[in-house]
Amino acid sequence: MNILLAIYGIAIIALALVVVGLVYRLMSLEAVLAGPREPTLPTPDLVSSKIDEKNSHHLLIVVDDSCSICHRTVKYLSDEAERDPQLSDLVTVLANAAVFESRGIPIVVDPEEHRRLHQGWAPAGLVFSAQGLVEAVPVGSTESVDFAVERLSFLAAIPA
């Protein structure tokens, strides 16, 4: 009897995790379908030079030197850029200190710009168009980084 209760308990927990995952995916899909919002922050110079006809949006990842998740995110982006060199045209990392290394993603160390663009949490993915900030998203997992990069293609397909 106790074994049966344990199995039911595990099944209920697994089902709850599936429901949480589905709700998260539904919220992500809702955000995608909502489209871009009005820009609230002008596009910084370090990004505006990378926005052109080919790349209408650019992802700026704002990281902190004391954030372990930020270090993992930069390493992941670096590894991905080795597999897909085009990623270096789409993503830039903005750091507050020169402690990050990357083999393909440009890293800009500018404490003043970092303070101006910091969202209060890190790592933050800021998607910019030529008009300014389109959206800010957390990018603390490999899945969220991939989603943010894929979102650039979606935004590029929306007429201005």
Image (cartoon, rainbow, N blue to C red):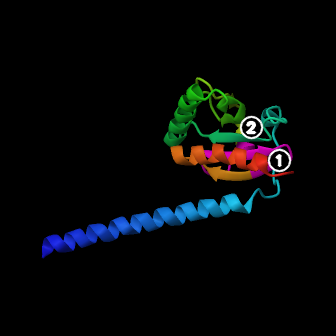
Badge 2 amino acid? Glu
Residue 115's spot in the image, x, y percent?
Answer: 71, 43
What residue appears at the point 12 percent right and 76 percent down from the top-left corner?
A: 1
- Residue 77 on the magenta segment: no
* Label 1 crowd (10 A; few <14 / some 14-19 / many >=20): some
Residue 52's spot in the image, x, y percent?
Answer: 84, 35
Q: Residue furthest top?
A: 103
Say whether disc 2 or disc 1 marks the residue closer to the N-terminus.
2
* Pointer 2 residue: 112
Q: Of 127 and 110, which appears nearest the observer?
A: 127
The disc label shown at residue 132, or none: 1
What residue appears at the point 22 percent right and 69 percent down from the top-left corner?
A: 7
Label 2 – label 1 distance at C-alpha: 18 Å
What residue appears at the point 86 percent right and 47 percent down from the top-left corner?
A: 131
Report helix, strand or loop for mark 1: strand
**In the shown orientation, is residue 16 left or right of residue 149?**
left
